[in-house]
Image (tube, helix red, strand yellow):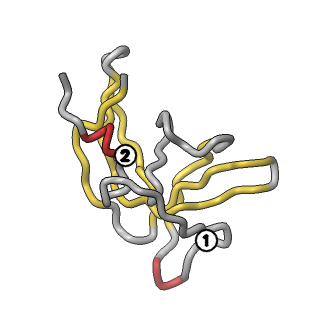
Amino acid sequence: MKRIIEIVPARPGWYARWRFAPDATRSYPVTVWALVEDTEQASREVVGVDSIGQWPGGDDNEAGADFVRYLFQPPETGEPDDAHQRTRSTSGSGVPPSLLEPAT
């Protein structure tokens, strides 16, 4: 099981790019960076959680979405061409509430 251990806000300009088809990508703003622990493998990694709560390795990611990469685009230059601004009910931080429950 994966659990978020620590969260820090992401600076504006960070995006997570996802592929939905060979020629179709969508980028969502990264809202927070999270330290994720995999309790089954005793490992940790840092992931960006995007504005709709997706993160590489997440169980609730959009169907058919494959993570491509993180990208930074300075806010003064605008958003990436494939930027998408959809909202989904989460904890407000973009982190799915199930990941914020205390570890047992």
The residue furthest bottom is: 76
The dot on residue 16 is none
Residue 97: give x, y in percent of width and height.
Answer: 31, 44
Residue carrying label 2: 96
Quarter of the rendering occupied by the N terminus: top left
Query: Along the line of sight, which residue is nearer the eye, 86 or 31?
Result: 86
Give SS at disc 2. Answer: loop
Three-letter code for the amino acid on which mark 1 is drawn: Pro
Q: Classify 3 as above or below 81.
A: above
Asked which quadrant contains residue 84, the reply is: bottom right
Query: Along the line of sight, which residue is nearer the eye, 75 or 93?
Result: 93
Residue carrying label 1: 80
In the rendered structure, which disc, 1 or 2, sits on the residue that comes first in sequence?
1
Residue 12: give x, y in percent of width and height.
Answer: 39, 71
Asked which quadrant contains residue 35, the reply is: top left
Q: CA distance from mark 1 to mark 2?
A: 24 Å
Quarter of the rendering occupied by the C terminus: top left
| Residue at 50% over, 39% down | 60
The residue furthest front is: 89
Specify few, some or many for label 1: CA neighbours under 10 Å numbering under 14, 14-19, or 20 or more: some
Three-letter code for the amino acid on which mark 2 is drawn: Pro
Give SS at disc 1. Answer: loop
Query: Along the line of sight, which residue is nearer the eye, 66 or 76?
Result: 66
Q: How many dots with numbers? A: 2
| Residue at 59% over, 45% down | 62
Residue 101: give x, y in percent of width and height.
Answer: 23, 36
| Residue at 66% over, 67% down | 82
